[in-house]
Amino acid sequence: MEDVVEADRAGRADGRMMRRRVPAGEFDVALNRWGRFAGADGRQHGPGEWIRADGELVRSRFDRTELDLLTVDAPHLTVTRTGQDVAHTADVRHIVVVQLAGTSVLTPVDGHPPVQFAPGTISYGDPTVPYRWEFDGPFQLLMLRTPRAALPLAPAALRSVIGRPFASDAGYARLAVRFACDVLHDDTLLAGPTAPRIAHDVVGVFTTVLAERLRLTDSSDPSEPAFQRAVAYIAAQLVDPLAVPDIADAVDMSPRYLQSVFQQRGMSVTGWIRERRLERARQALADPIWADADILQVAVAHGFSGHSHFTRAFRAAYGETPNRWRGRAA
């Protein structure tokens, strides 16, 4: 048990890619960031006691992104996520859940209706809301947790899909789920120098799944096409100087309207650009392909004007310098 706890601490501390299997008796330690667990009797139990049957957790972690595949052969299980748990995971902004087998009901405490999960459903959740999550029968669950900046989607816009499960067994969602499960089950994929890229690929496919869902959900939003044009242009020109008037002119709208489209989604144009540049640069600093590039080269290649500008922005966003992050992730 001590080894499991220390392994989790080390994974959080050094940012390196981790992939490991966790025995059923250690789930409540490995999953302590999910919430607090109780068995069929409704009581919370100590380590190794809340589950009476065999199970398996396969976990991939890199930087602030975690991908879990949890298989449990138990008659009943309850997870309670409290306000204290929320406070301990303030850095996590996106949670995607796929119920691969079994059923469950997630009841948020903010007054929203319960979310019903059936086999083959996928859902986007709000990690800032405490909940009670009840599972019936043996089940299998895939969960992706990743920071806000890792998904080039507007957090405010994603509110429209919170608590609205949809099918994961058709179209691109089916391919995304299969890819994530295949990655977790292949011991070689997450063991080499390309592991960080593969982890980001998993995040990327689920970004596409959510983007497609947003397109279907927000079809009545008249500003959505304008927003999509703007973010597509920004993504294509991210390494170049980007000013609001120039972006507005390129996507055929006024600067004021461009700013309002982003403000409706809880952000500014410049804030969106800064987040995208920082996240790409952070990924590059952990990528072996960029190992021979110095910090200045990485900064300029991702749209920053110089070393000091990049370092200040990076420290403000992540709480450490680019050099320190690169050293920990190497």
Image (cartoon, rainbow, N blue to C red):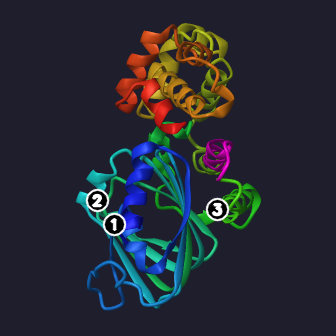
Name the residue beneath numbered marker 1. 35
Tags 2 and 1 in contact by the CB under 8 Å rule?
A: yes
Name the residue beneath numbered marker 2. 85
Q: In this view, does 128 lie above or below 292?
A: below
Residue at mark 1 to residue at mark 3: CA–CA distance:
23 Å
Look at label 1 and name its amino acid.
Gly
Q: Which of marks 1 and 3 is nearer the N terminus?
A: 1
SS of the residue under disc 2: helix
Residue at mark 2 to residue at mark 1: CA–CA distance:
6 Å
Question: At which x and y percent is residue 199?
Answer: 62, 48
Name the residue beneath numbered marker 3. 184
Q: Where are the magenta residues, as a range?
A: 191-205
Q: Is residue 118 above or below residue 280?
A: below
Residue occupying the point 47% across, 37% down = 328
Q: In this view, does 113 lie to the left or right of 202?
A: left
Question: At which x and y percent is residue 168?
Answer: 66, 64
SS of the residue under disc 1: loop
Residue occupying the point 53% across, 39% down = 150
Figure quadrant of the C terminus: top right
Tags 1 and 3 in contact by the CB under 8 Å rule?
A: no
Residue at mark 2 to residue at mark 3: CA–CA distance:
26 Å
